[in-house]
Image (spheres, rainbow, N blue to C red):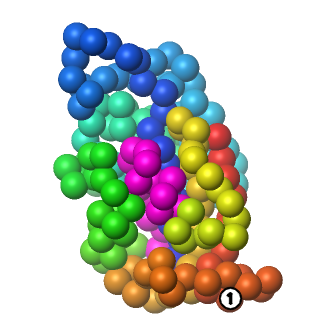
């Protein structure tokens, strides 16, 4: 069984003086990230590994999550391939994760994060993630490389996929 948490970065400031990559979180964004992280903590959903886009707003969101969830620094990584990544690129990052990781968290950007969540669980009609929102899914697979949106199916008993919850 593998557990995946997908997170959209929290609300960022709109600044014309910096590049998109350098946009920081707003006060609202910092609050969103903390609230969502605390909801995940309360639900007992602490990942073994957190991988985030290195964009400033996404890295800050990941840092807030890591702090609130008490994830050790060695279990937090930034991956340039996640910056504005498509659903396919996010899936490739997931599939490249080692088998010892039971619960993986990705912190990224829309539309990729929302598209991937909806591809995994179309019957849930998750829609577009709000800023700072998270979705946790469980899959009946032994390795991350076996995970594929085309094979993830959910029945009433959660035969291969189960939506744990939406947060934020």
Q: Does residue 99 appear in the picture of this structure?
A: no
Q: Which residues are magenta?
A: 102-117
Query: Counting other residues with Cα less than 10 Å from the Cα at mark 1, is it few (<14), some (14-19), or many (20 or more)?
Result: few
Residue at horizontal 25 percent and vertical 41 percent from the top: 54
Quadrant, the C terminus: top right
**Would residue 63 be found to the left or right of residue 80 on screen?**
right
Residue shown at the point (48%, 58%) measured from the top left = 115
Vertical relation: 162 (above or below) 104: below
Toward the viewer: 162 or 14? Answer: 14
Q: Which residue is mark 1?
A: 159
Q: Residue at x 40, y 87 (%)?
A: 146
Q: Position of residue 110 (x, y in %)?
A: 43, 45
x and y, in percent, of residue 94 in the image: 36, 69
Q: Position of residue 127 (x, y in %)?
A: 62, 52
Q: Is residue 23 magenta?
A: no
Which residue of the protein is positioned furthest toward the right in this rendering?
156
On the rendered structure, is 143 left or right of 152? left
């Amino acid at each position: 069984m593998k557990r995946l948490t997908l997170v959209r970065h929290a609300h960022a400031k709109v600044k014309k003086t910096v590049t998109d990559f350098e946009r920081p979180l707003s006060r609202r964004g910092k609050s969103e990230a903390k609230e969502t992280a605390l909801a995940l903590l309360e639900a007992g959903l602490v990942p073994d590994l957190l991988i985030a886009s290195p964009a400033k707003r996404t890295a800050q969101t990941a840092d807030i999550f890591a702090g609130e969830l008490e994830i050790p620094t060695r279990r937090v990584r930034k991956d340039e391939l996640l910056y504005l990544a498509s659903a396919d690129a996010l899936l490739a990052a997931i599939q490249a994760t080692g088998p010892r990781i039971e619960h993986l968290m990705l912190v990224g950007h829309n539309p990729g994060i929302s598209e991937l969540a909806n591809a995994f669980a179309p019957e849930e009609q998750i829609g577009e993630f709000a800023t700072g929102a998270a979705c946790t899914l469980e899959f009946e697979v032994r390795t991350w490389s076996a995970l594929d949106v085309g094979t993830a199916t959910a029945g009433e008993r959660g035969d291969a996929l189960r939506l744990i919850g939406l947060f934020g």
